Amino acid sequence: MERLLEILNKQLNEHLLRITVSRKRHADGADKVKIRPVTVKGKLLFQTAVSDGKKEFHKNYEKDALTAQIETWLLQDYRQLNMETQELSVQALVSKKGKASVKVRRKEQPEEAAAAEHNRKKQYLLEEGRAVPFLVDLGVQTPEGKTVNAHYRKFRQINRFLEFVADILPALDKDRELTIIDFGCGKSYLTFAMYYYLHEQQGLDVRMIGLDLKEDVIAHCNQLAVRYGYEKLRFFTGDIASYEGCTQADMVVTLHACDTATDYALEKAVAWNAKVILSVPCCQHELNRQIHSDLMQPVLKYGLIKERMAALLTDAFRAEILEEQGYQVQILEFIDMEHTPKNILIRAVKKKNGAKQTNRALTACMEAWNAQPLLGSLLKRGEEDEALQQENT
């Protein structure tokens, strides 16, 4: 181990390319830790990336602190370290007793280091300098494609949403027309962004539908779609709960559908067997009226705390219910254009087998909170109606 620490002490510099700590000793914990050099405000640091399977966590270390942390990881949590510098490849295997076997190989051809700047220019999915019609109309870009400084935040946020969309592309069929529905589309900034990215940039055959209650907004969105030549992007006025304009969808998006409107959108997505669901909930009041717990009463007696806990429970229950329906679900952080504190995005992707399953722990948890989420009730009602139809036929 001493030899390994000496190598680390010597090689943790600007010539480092990457380090991977892997082969975990215990079933729990992250599979691996990735490390790279970064420069923050002119100072060389080392950034670790640890993933829990749903979200990646980053932390910056100074050299000595990182060396100590790596030693702890290898003695307690992991068995292997691989390090690449511009000139060396290093592999270390550590036994249960802490004995390290180290192999060092010098590269025949030195490898170039990537830029280490932590705040280097980001490569956005919607490229800077390339004019996009709806971004120009929004005032985010000039007609020449330059991003307006006052709206750079909005430009970043639109691109951030598209990154979530890009992540799920492998789950969608590419050899046929895809149907995507945006419930509660509003002014449709992100609807236009999705259509442009999927159809114009990715070349996918996409039919996209936007639904909202505001007739004037819908009329304006349709005018813009015609102006941009987006032939398969159309907007309709209607309520999510009663919407019957579609019998199948590959992806369902719902951004800020108020209160239980999100549940109706999620229920329709499940009924359509949608491959992907992207949902940013809003204004969750349903469980705030329901939840009660004698054990948690000292906390719930504060109205503001109860309101926030109810909102978090609502989204957690929605995620777990979707898991029961055969989806792999992530809850991600997403700050959107509306400057809202509602910053949770539920991303659900249908598993390959898609088998439904009952989560008894979830049932017990809902009972403990005296909670009966609408999404669960809607899905149960749908299953009962389907079973009744099968009996009648």
Image: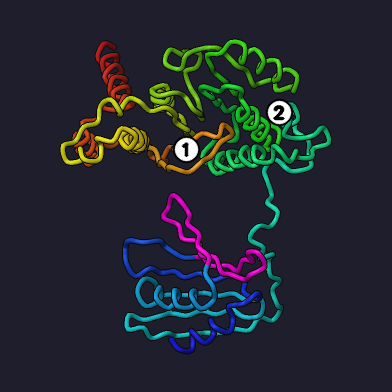
276 on left or right of 76: right
Task: Count neighbours of disc 1 (C-alpha within 10 A) and say few if under 14, some if 14 to 19, many if 20 or more.
Answer: many
Taking depth in this image into account, of 16 and 168 the one nearest to the observer is: 16
- Counting from the top left corner in percent of width and height, residue 223 is at 70, 15
Q: Residue at x 60, y 69 (%)?
A: 37
Residue 42 among those drawn in magenta: yes
Q: Which numbered disc covers residue 199?
A: none
297 on left or right of 201: left
101 on left or right of 302: right
Q: Secondary structure at mark 1?
A: strand
What kind of residue is marked 2? Answer: Leu
- Counting from the top left corner in percent of width and height, residue 330 is at 43, 43
User: Residue at label 1?
Assistant: 345
**Sequence-wise first label, 2 or 1:** 2
* Residue 94 appears in the figure: yes
Q: Residue at x 43, y 86 (%)?
A: 1
Q: Residue at x 64, y 29 (%)?
A: 195
Which quadrant of the structure image shows residue 230? top right
What kind of residue is marked 1? Answer: Leu
- Counting from the top left corner in percent of width and height, residue 49 is at 50, 61
Q: Give the number of the mark in front: 2 or 1.
A: 2
- Counting from the top left corner in percent of width and height, residue 211 is at 54, 18
Work out whether 323 lies above or below 255. Answer: below
2 and 1 marks in contact (CB < 8 Å): no
User: Residue at label 2?
Assistant: 138
Q: Which residues are magenta?
A: 34-60
- Residue furthest to the left in view is 294
Q: Secondary structure at mark 2?
A: helix
